[in-house]
Amino acid sequence: MPQLGLLPRRAWAALLSQLLRPPCASCTRAVRCHSQGTRDLSPQQMVVREKILDLVVSCFKRHGAKGMDTPAFELKEMLTEKYGEDSGLMYDLKDQGGELLSLRYDLTVPFARYLAMNKVKKMKRYHVGKVWRRESPTIVQGRYREFCQCDFDIAGQFDPMIPDAECLKIMCEILNGLQLGDFLIKVNDRRIVDGMFAVCGVPESKFRTICSSIDKLDKMAWKDVRHEMVAKKGLAPEVADRIGDYVRCHGGESLVKQMFQDPRLSQNKQALEGLGDLKLLFEYLTLFGIAKKISFDLSLARGLDYYTGVIYEAVLLHTPTQAGEEPLSVGSVAAGGRYDGLVGMFDPKGHKVPCVGLSIGVERIFNIVEQRMKTFGEKVRTTETQVLVATPHKNFLHERLKLIAELWDAGIKAEMLYKNNPKLLTQLHYCESTGIPLVVIVGEQELKEGVVKIRSVASREEVAIKRENLVAEIQKRLSES
Amino acid sequence: MAERAALEELVKLQGERVRGLKQQKASAELIEEEVAKLLKLKAQLGPDESKQKFVLKTPKGTRDYSPRQMAVREKVFDIIIRCFKRHGAEVIDTPVFELKETLTGKYGEDSKLIYDLKDQGGELLSLRYDLTVPFARYLAMNKLNNIKRYHIAKVYRRDNPAMTRGRYREFYQCDFDIAGNFDPMIPDAECLKIMCEILSSLQIGDFLVKVNDRRILDGMFAICGVPDSKFRTICSSVDKLDKVSWEEVKNEMVGEKGLAPEVADRIGDYVQQHGGVSLVEQLLQDPKLSQNKQALEGLRDLKLLFEYLALFGIDDKISFDLSLARGLDYYTGVIYEAVLLQTPAQAGEEPLGVGSVAAGGRYDGLVGMFDPKGRKVPCVGLSIGVERIFSIVEQRLEALEEKVRTTETQVLVASAQKKLLEERLKLVSELWDAGIKAELLYKKNPKLLNQLQYCEEAGIPLVAIIGEQELKDGVIKLRSVTSREEVDVRREDLVEEIKRRTGQPLCVC
């Protein structure tokens, strides 16, 4: 990944407005677009995507994860009731007389189904695949309906917090490797959230709905969130204020210690469990050398229903342009948590398999990298061709065909123009426009002498090589560059 | 029991009420009130042993890929992609679904096998049936005149699955296509060269590529006396010759499809022929066939193709086979299909084809169906049928008893005594930061034996053992799992030593 400097504030604003641009509106041309909220990926975009996925997958592999894959759709009944409020956003397949099917909404529920189905008790796996959500494009601009997720999960009954710590280590390794600038990982715990609500006086029936208000604190100001809770959700104002005191807290290990001493929170068994686990987690994160990237943040709530313990979310930071400025977060790029009850929902006997995992939001990362490249006018090669087989003369097609087959059979990446009698200039232009570094030129004189010319496209230097030494010479030059 | 049923009914009604309110976007307070009621009702129901109303399975015709199958898949894709890249192809991706109208009318009789998405108030969508039609749509939409691209992705067909024979409803295709107006047969020859390179590299046994041409087929039918209206249906009968005998095919054509017997016989004379370029030359002299303009075009193109294939060194793998027909409607010129051959049990036996593993052809009219002005972009391409190849490679590995590792871990960080978790965490983190693939057991005080066993099962070659005495001495014991040899390595030299043993470059890449 090329290391580019971070952008000044104005450029960030321009970038953000471009990121929030609405997806392709319906076309007026006769050739219909791809469907709303989806897009093709051009060769340029694919190169960027593959670099990113490569980095993510090699990190997963470095941690000993096995790959797996599941079908694009599941039996509808598998997916029902797993996503809480978001259930309405699933794509259903038409009832064509067979089973009722839906496109998968994430990779976690299929994973739980896989574990239950195959009676697997322990597994460390990664899964890179597309998921589909019928987000309303008018409400959520810039969000695609088909997008890629990269998930890593550790399933199994283990000693506490070791796998959880490894998940956070992985998130840091990936975000560091992608060189997207400074980042922060917010950490919290479902039990602390619920405990906090309890001690603040939130009625149990309102837990989930207050939770989703709190979740908006990364996008909305506290007073707006407070207003929603009090005016729209009927929460008593003093309860809201008590919540406010907590959710503005964020810090490191010391905050965990502080919360242990909190007179109200320390009375709540659930919260204490969560705090105890976080304390242990921070110990391990320190040993992993990443504690300074982690912030215990009491405002972190996270949408999905199935989390049961630690939850985390990574955000990219914009470095302050002046001293004292708050870092501006530009949205989450990775998230995850512990979900101990999900597999049990699939297992016929309700057997639980505790799980903890993370999901990398590659689409957002992909957008950021793409925008950065556009801003800096960066272009990438879309092919890996090393040699163009060319000729200045007419009637040399057969010679080119023989020669190129020799190169392919030796494993060299080579192309030729699909013309019987191409002009040399055209062939050289093709090299320049596609970034091919070497040309092998065969002509009448060379043929008589039993040689071919190798030409470096960049330096324009040409040298004649004996035909039988050609492959070795090319391989030597390619390994040197 | 009746009470329970009544309660379940109440739960269902209340659930519907909640869903209705949410859809109407009623006030949050009202919704939450009704949700609370629902939860209370559900709590009354209590735990339900018959909660499991569904069977735990993947949809019909689909399957998960286990880690072992993923490892095989990755190996196969690696070989295929390397070949595509060697030939200078770019890569693209398209969405899993297309507008229904994009796919309509492109697949002939197979159209009924398309998966539709439910009408949920938006556009009508269908899951892609292949990668070729999306490609043509992509070309037309972006007004591209030429591109050489590959695309590897899953496609969806509501077929009758035969999973034992590798026929699924969701399966991978690996497509390579060259679009553009070029001098004849050069790209077509490259497609065949690619097919041969891939099938050779995969080492799945001997293979043969059958080649024919749509124009030769149509010309042949014409001069044999097949009525125009029966062309396609007779074509699909002829297509079955790779699986059934000529007698059976003739019966179908005459008995079921109403073809005159003498017409069938004339067809028989042609379609039972296969050979190399000499057969092409022979047919160019054929008194009847040479009278047909279409057939002549096809034969001439095949003659040129064989010249190029000889220069590519693969003409011994190619057979001009007049019985090759191929299903899809959009082919306009050369068509080809690669089949694996069983090695003959005795000398002189004919190799028996065991099914096609790759196929393709030229399709010059497809992009024009999408372009608003009907602008044509000639295309030629191939598709590798990887699902069958996966099972063959898997079987081969099992037969060779080759263990397929499902992880790439190089080192397990282990401890010999209790209370060494901290040290293990520190060390494994050091290894990860240096780019080494490492694991540790998620136990505070694992037994050494269990840790060693874990390595043997997972195929991890090295163990880095932390012990109390070694810690004091500033060393780590590095143990080879296979040879069981142990050596003390200084802590600061450990990374380098591991990289040396695993053949990794010393820089962190």
Image (cartoon, coloured by chain):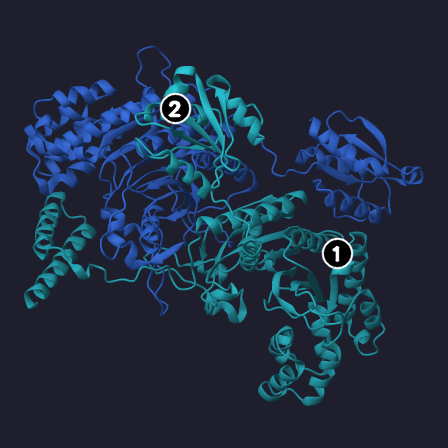
Chain colours: A blue, B cyan
Choose top left, top right, bottom left or bottom right for residue B223.
bottom right
Residue in the picture at 63% in, 52% down = B202
How much space separates mark 2 and mark 1, taking CA atoms? 68 Å
Establish if B389 lies above or below B299. Answer: above
**Observer able to see residue A328:** no
The image shows residue A239 at horizontal and vertical percentages of: 7, 30
Q: Quadrant of the C terminus of chain A?
A: top right
For this orientation, the residue located farthest to the top is A323
Of the numbered discs 2 and 1, the one sitting upstream in the chain is 1
| Circle on res. A67 | none
- Residue A74 shown left or right of residue A380 in the figure: left
Residue annotated with mark 2: B467
**Percent coordinates x, y for residue B240 in the rendering:** 61, 75
For image coordinates 74% across by 62% down, the residue present is B318
Chain letter of disc 1 in the image: B
Q: Residue B185 got which mark? A: 1
Tell me if mark 1 has few (under 14), some (14-19) or many (20+) residues whose alpha carbon lies within 10 angstroms of its own.
many
Residue A11, image quadrant:
top left
Under mark 1, the amino acid is Met
Subunit under mark 2: B
